Amino acid sequence: MGKHVVGRVSAIPPGDRRIFEAEGRSIGIFNVGGEFFAIRNSCPHQAAPLCLGSIKGMTMPSKPGEYIWAREGEILRCPWHGWEFDIKTGRSIFNPHRTRVKAYDVTVEDHVDGIEDDESVETYDVSVEDGWIVLHV
C-alpha cells in the first residue's frame, strides 16, 4: 500500500474536494465537515469522472407527506447520469450492498518524513493547525 502526501489540510476547505493521481489512479479527496475521505474518480456505471459531480444531501425515510433532508455535503452525484454515492464509504445510495466505488484511507499527520518546510522563506506564527493530508492507496 502506497502512502502519498497530497497537501496541507488548509488546501481543501470543508465542503470542497481535490482530485489527485496516485499509482495510476485518479482519486478525489473530500473534506466533509473537517474529516477527509477519498474515493476513486470513476463511476462504476460508465466510468464518468465521478469526483467532478455535485455534492449534496439526501431525503431520509419518513412519514407520507413529510420530507426530511439530511446528510448535507456527504452525497456525491455523478455528473453524467446522476448516480449517487456516499462520500464516506463509496457505497451507492440506491443499492449499497452491490454497487460501490473504491474508497481509500486518508489520514492527517502533523509531520511527514521527507517533507520539511522551506527554511529560506520568511514565516510568521499562526494559530491555525495545518497538518499534512496523506492518501493511502
Image: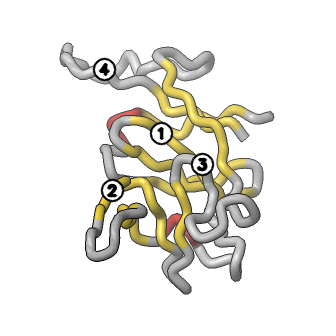
User: Does the CB distance between marks 3 and 4 fall below 8 Å?
Assistant: no
Left or right: residue 54 compared with residue 78: left
Residues packed near mark 3 inside 10 Å, few (<14), some (14 to 19) or many (20 plus): some
* Protein image colouring: secondary structure
Rendered position, 81 above or below 93: below
Write down the residue under mark 2.
70
Per the model, the C-alpha gap separating discs 2 and 3 is 16 Å
Identify the mark nearer the N-term, 1 or 2: 1
Identify the mark nearer the N-term, 1 or 3: 1
Whole-percent x, y for residue 110 in the image: 46, 16
Query: Residue sitting at 43 percent across and 20 percent down?
Result: 117
> Residue 27 bears which disc, if any?
none
Location of residue 105 (image quadrant): top right
Q: Is residue 14 visible?
A: yes
Frontmost residue, 15 versus 117: 15
> Which secondary structure lies at badge 4?
loop
Whole-percent x, y for residue 79 in the image: 49, 79
Write down the residue under mark 4.
129
Q: What amino acid is found at the position of numbered circle 1 in the picture?
A: Phe
Write down the residue under mark 1.
36
Identify the mark nearer the N-term, 2 or 3: 2
**Residue at far right of view:** 1
